[in-house]
Image: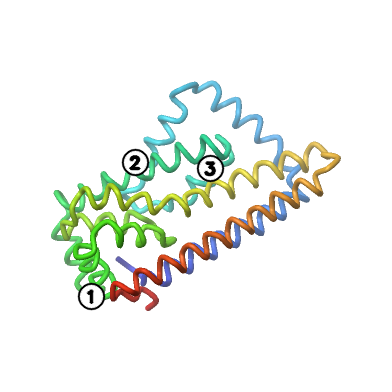
Amino acid sequence: MGSSLYERQKRKRIAWIAAGVLVAVLAFEGRHLAHFLPVMERFVERLGPSGPLIYIAAIVVLEPLLFPNTLFGWMAGVVFGLPFGFIYYAGGVYLANLLVYLIGRRLLRRPVLRALEDRADVQAALTAAKREGTSLVFWLRMLPLNPALFSYAFGAVEVPFRTIALGGFGMLPHLLLDVYIGTVAARVTEMADQSHSRWEIEGFGLVLGLIAVGIVFWRVARIAKAHIKKAGVNLDR
């Protein structure tokens, strides 16, 4: 499982902060990149209905390889916009993690169990998940971690499929944040290129919204951690 779960959470937070800084830079200097946006939009339009399917298929293929799905979320916001981008991204990640769970359970059970031998924090979380069921899996999914890591582990220790399927909806808040970052980045880039007469106001509102969404997610993650600790699991190590 590599580095600790706490370090992985920290890295994802840093990635989100860096993305927020990038959005602020794009608000002022985005005109240099804005000409790429129509090119991307025309490319997606030419793909037609197959565009979202190709995008979702890419997630399903790369998720088992622990590809950072945050990048897919940012891409969804830029290419598809917030509503549809979130639907495609969340659907792709959800399906991919059901597949990863099955791979961990059916094909890679022994290698995953060996990898977990020196990870007392993850083992404690898995034991609690089997005991507590859907509620704890839901709270674990709310943490800003690559979900495939836990999907492999859930499969290896044979947490019931129904528990995983229902608890997987806990991923939605941080998946929404990923897509929102991409959407805001695309919008402020467009405004910077068009010399939008009110871009300072609208751009400020978008960035402020991004900060608000980040704060809400941070609060949700704290609530999730509190519930996880109540189950006797401490992942801050």
Look at 45% across and 41% down and name the residue there: 89
Q: Earlier in the sequence, mark 2 or mark 1?
A: 2
* x then y, percent, for residue 24: 71, 55
Q: Secondary structure at mark 3?
A: helix
Q: CA distance from mark 2 to mark 1?
A: 29 Å
The one of 168 and 122 positioned closer to us in this rendering: 168
* x then y, percent, for residue 30: 73, 45
Asked if marks 3 and 2 touch (Cβ < 8 Å), the reply is no
Q: Which residue is mark 3?
A: 75
Q: Residues within 10 Å of mark 2 (few under 14, many from 20)?
A: many
Q: Amino acid at mark 3?
A: Met
Which circle marks residue 60 in the picture?
Answer: 2
| Quadrant assignment for the N terminus | bottom left
Asked if marks 2 and 1 touch (Cβ < 8 Å), the reply is no
Q: Which residue is mark 1?
A: 118
Q: Earlier in the sequence, mark 1 or mark 3?
A: 3
Q: Amino acid at mark 1?
A: Asp
Q: Is residue 50 above or below residue 8?
A: above
Q: Amino acid at mark 2?
A: Val
Q: Is residue 42 above or below residue 189?
A: above
Q: Residue furthest bottom?
A: 237
The one of 21 and 125 positioned closer to us in this rendering: 125
Q: Quadrant of residue 125?
A: bottom left
| Quadrant assignment for the C terminus | bottom left
Marker count (numbered): 3
Q: Residues within 10 Å of mark 1 (few under 14, many from 20)?
A: few
Look at 78% across and 39% down and name the residue there: 193
Q: Is residue 127 above or below residue 41?
A: below
Q: CA distance from mark 3 to mark 2?
A: 15 Å
Q: Residues within 10 Å of mark 3 (few under 14, many from 20)?
A: many
Q: CA distance from mark 1 to mark 3?
A: 35 Å
In this picture, residue 207 sits left or right of residue 141: right
